[in-house]
Image: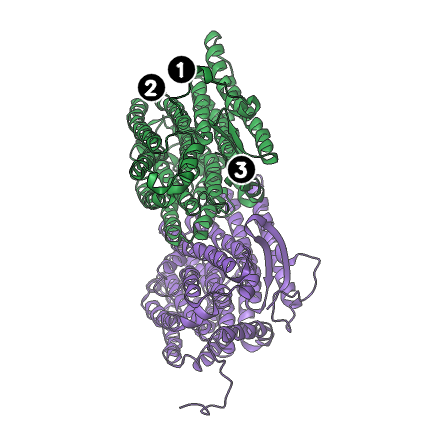
Amino acid sequence: MIAQSTIADYVAPGVDWFALSPYLVPAAGALVLMVVGALTPTWPRGLYAAFTAACAVGAGVLSLFVWDDITDGAPGTLVAGALSHDTFAHLVALTVLVATALVALVTDGTLRGTSGDGPEMYALMLVAAVGAMVMGAANDLIVLFLGLETLSLALYVMAASDRRRTASGEAGLKYFVLGGFASAFLLYGIALLYGAARSTNIGEIVEYFQTSVPTERNDALVLAGVALLVVGLGFKVAAVPFHVWSPDVYQGAPSNVTAFMASVGKAGAVAAMARVLIVALPFHRDDWRPVIWVLAVASLVVGSLLAVVQTDVKRMLAYSSVSHAGFLLVGIEAAGHRAGEDAAGSGLQSVLVYLALYGVLVVGSFGVITVVSAARGGSSDLASFDGLAQRRPVLALAMTVFLLAQAGVPLTSGFVAKWGVIQAAVDERSYAVAIIAMVAAVIAAFLYLRIMVSMWLKPADNDDAVAVPGLTAVAVGIAVAVTIAVGVYPQWLLDATDVVSQYAR
Amino acid sequence: MVAATGSALAFPLLSMLVFIPAVGALAVTLMPRRRPEYAKLTAAVASVATGALTVWATQAFDTADDGFQFVSRHPWIEAWGISWHLGVDGISLFLVLLTGLLFPLAILGIDPHNDDPARDKPYFAWLLLLEAGVMGSFISLDLFLFFVFFEIVLVPMYFLIGGWGYEGRVYAATKFFLYTMVGSAFMLVSILATVFIARNNGLGYVTFDLVELANEAEFAASTGRWLFFGFAVAFAVKVPVFPLHTWLPDAHTQAPTAGSVVLAGVMLKLGTYGMLRFGLYLFPEAAYWSRYLWLTLATIGIIYGAIAATMQKDLKRLVAYSSVAHLGFIVLGTFAFTTQAITGSVIQMVNHGVSTGALFLMVGMIYERRHTRQIAELNGIQKVAPIFAAAFMVVMLSSIGVPGLNGFVGEFLVLIGSFATARWWVVIAATGVILAALYLLWAYQRVFHGEPDEENATFRELRWGEAMVILPFLAAIFFAGLYPKPMLDRIEPAVDALVERVAEHTDFEIPTPTIAGEDDR
């Protein structure tokens, strides 16, 4: 088909600018920052951050309008089948945009007044956000790869952005090498899948498997492709055993960038994994589901256990984010039982809701860490949290809310997220993985308790003045409000996201 | 047992029992830091108001009704079939009352010894939040709601032990939190499985409503047993049933006095209450099937707790181990499945709360005066503080179960009620009563009798303020011991209904009261 088409046959696809606006606004914002920022002297008083947050919020509002359009009409595809036009994509987009806005506010607190302040960081953030959104919306494996690379390349630079600390450069390099490695796996997987299904378009791949007689299928190619895709995406998700980069990178990167990686990076990666496995490969669900099961259990157990023995708070949260990835995989595993059917269960919804809630939580957590470690000259050792409650009771209380939420204590958003995933798993009778996940959550709770003990029950061993910049306080405040509001009254979120399982391809 | 409102109330009584302390906790938190004295005042007002409502509820409770009363039901998370469904029956009524009365006493009567008055604020906020959680657990008729409350109580308790406890507090608090959470992990999966299996077998829709699930859902025997065990693990940790009890001595000993009183008084009952409400009621077949396991563990707990208590050198730890023994009796009665035994268990839950709560309170007073809990360092207190010693004596005798005091009523009903269905376990368990006399009287002898040495000669007599806190406990001990009828009247109908429910779903036959020896072989 492709060989036969010539330039003459080419018809430019229609472009629905409104439907694309949530992707275009941050991209345009990044360009404005780069161009105008380069031509003008340093912007005063956090204007970079405000502009970035405004772009993200504006795109988020547009995304909500588009969401409304989709639920009123029907999901479809955009730009000749390159992007999906569905609520799945826009829930991921909203997750990414909210997290981006919050991280922009936190970043201002870190960078303002230092030599690192400038438009570059914010431009990279917006570019990365577009990448993550495209990963969630991709309806073509090549587009998905483009999104992934856009996100990753921006993240590599961001991780290495703190030129004053060698750890930052090391983190960037490590992330770059291992990330490149993962991208290669992913690309090879896409190639093999193309070889089998004769297309990279998700809609056409599904159609191929629907119509072709099993004997025609090139199953070895497909299975090898699926395996490589899972490896590549597993790296990005930081699932065990592909997680080894994450503690070093999380620790080495500046805290605000870590916040971005843990929220936006994870959202993009998990959304891409859900796209590839659930949307594109429902016909091979029985092949990939056991693999995801193993990855989920390994991530849960290893992530929780290794988190407990760390002494650096950022490393702790890095391992805990591996454990959270395990929870997300539990949801994907649950969605795998009936992927592609009409009554697909709530697995996909639970995964995307988990991502959204975790994104806010983790930005809040790292927002607090940013402030505390800044007072310690960039060290995020557990000891730097000693006696925080005496020095900064409100900050300690906010961190406690985040930690309890990550532990899954009721009346916080973390509980709603975990409940959703476990519910989806139990609904599919995956009792074993549900129990393992809950026990892993208890192990991880020990880690959160350690931080709380340090904050509340240990005497302050120093009187470092912990300064809380205004915009960081706003970001942390918003995160706390969301965490508690969703925890107490999750009904609206569940109702609104009920439609995400009606995806397009 | 379909929810029938005893009295159609426009006033959401039970919701208020949760909201008043919760709002109180919020108010205390938001209070300006410069005026710590208002923290205690607010806490006192909130807890007394809650207590007054529970007293009113007990008085207004319809003794002829074996169903749930004062029911309040509102949709909460409709997408998941979760509702705000509250109600009390005879089984939970007195636990609610106990919670309502214990907290004002703990808040007003026990000084947290904060060096820094600013620490009063979090202390009272945590206590009120704890009250809201405990109260909610006892009145929830929705599995999700129950789980939320059951889990939320961990957080305030963790901070109370960790923040205001004694030397080993961080270890004890963490152990307490993690042990309970492991149990809850199984319960959460079990709750979800129950709901989805019920949907697939007969119910047709997703609901977490306890009454609907109990009435409509049918579980295959093997399924029900798995589900029951998921719940039972969580409750067994909370009770605690031997061998899952190891968190308890640490938590009790290291907790501040108010924490110990609340922990022993009401929090352990979350486990035994849960066994009745979510074990026997929801899974009668599985509970009956596994009864020998529980009877055996309960009996081991009774004997083991008593022996361990005898060996303790620390007075507070001794009381903690005595709790293990006492809760063994409650579990024994629960799994004997007769009306008398279960009624005895419910009464014993309340009694243990009163007696052990009072014991912890008085041990706390001893520690305040002497700054030690070591039995070896205490002696001759009776000589210098006779009133204190007398009050301690009464509380201790009630804990032993001397006739005329509250402990006797519960223990006697448990033993006599269990005799028909669990004879040999009762024979062994009854020796636990004697052992209780041994370890408590021996401890009393060592601490109170003899000539006081130099350090104990200055032991201060009970003050008026302290007496005012002890007095309600003593009143409850005598009242329940001498005139238990109002309690029995309210508890029995609900227990009868529960026992009939078990008999309906199993081959269990309710033993008919016979003249001794008639059907003996």
Q: Considering only order in the chain, which callout, 1 or 3, is on the residue closer to the N terminus?
A: 1
In 3D space, how far apart are the residues under numbered discs 3 and 2 (Cα atoms)?
34 Å
Q: What colour do you see for chain B?
A: purple
Residue nearest the viewer, comparing B94 with B339: B339
Q: Secondary structure at mark 1?
A: loop
Would you say A384 lies left or right of A85 here? left
Chain in green (letter): A
The answer to whether one can see residue B444 in this image is yes
The answer to whether one can see residue B383 in this image is no
Residue A418 rendering spot, x and y as whole percentages: 45, 46
Q: Which mark is residue A482?
A: 3
Chain hosting mark 3: A
The residue type indicated by label 1 comes to Ser
* Residue that numbered label 1 is attached to: A115
Residue nearest the viewer, comparing B272 with B147: B147
Residue B316 rendering spot, x and y as whole percentages: 39, 62
The residue type indicated by label 3 comes to Val
Residue B135 rendering spot, x and y as whole percentages: 55, 57
Chain hosting mark 2: A
Q: Secondary structure at mark 3?
A: helix
Would you say A119 lies left or right of B69 here? left
In 3D space, how far apart are the residues under numbered discs 3 and 1 (Cα atoms)?
33 Å
Please rate how many residues cluster around mark 3, counting C-alpha atoms within 10 Å: few if below 14, some from 14 to 19, many from 20: some
Residue A308 quadrant: top left
**Is the C-beta separation of discs 3 and 1 under 8 Å?**
no
**Is the C-beta separation of discs 1 and 2 under 8 Å?**
yes
Farthest top residue in view: A39
Q: Is residue B111 above or below residue A332?
A: below
* Residue that numbered label 2 is attached to: A164
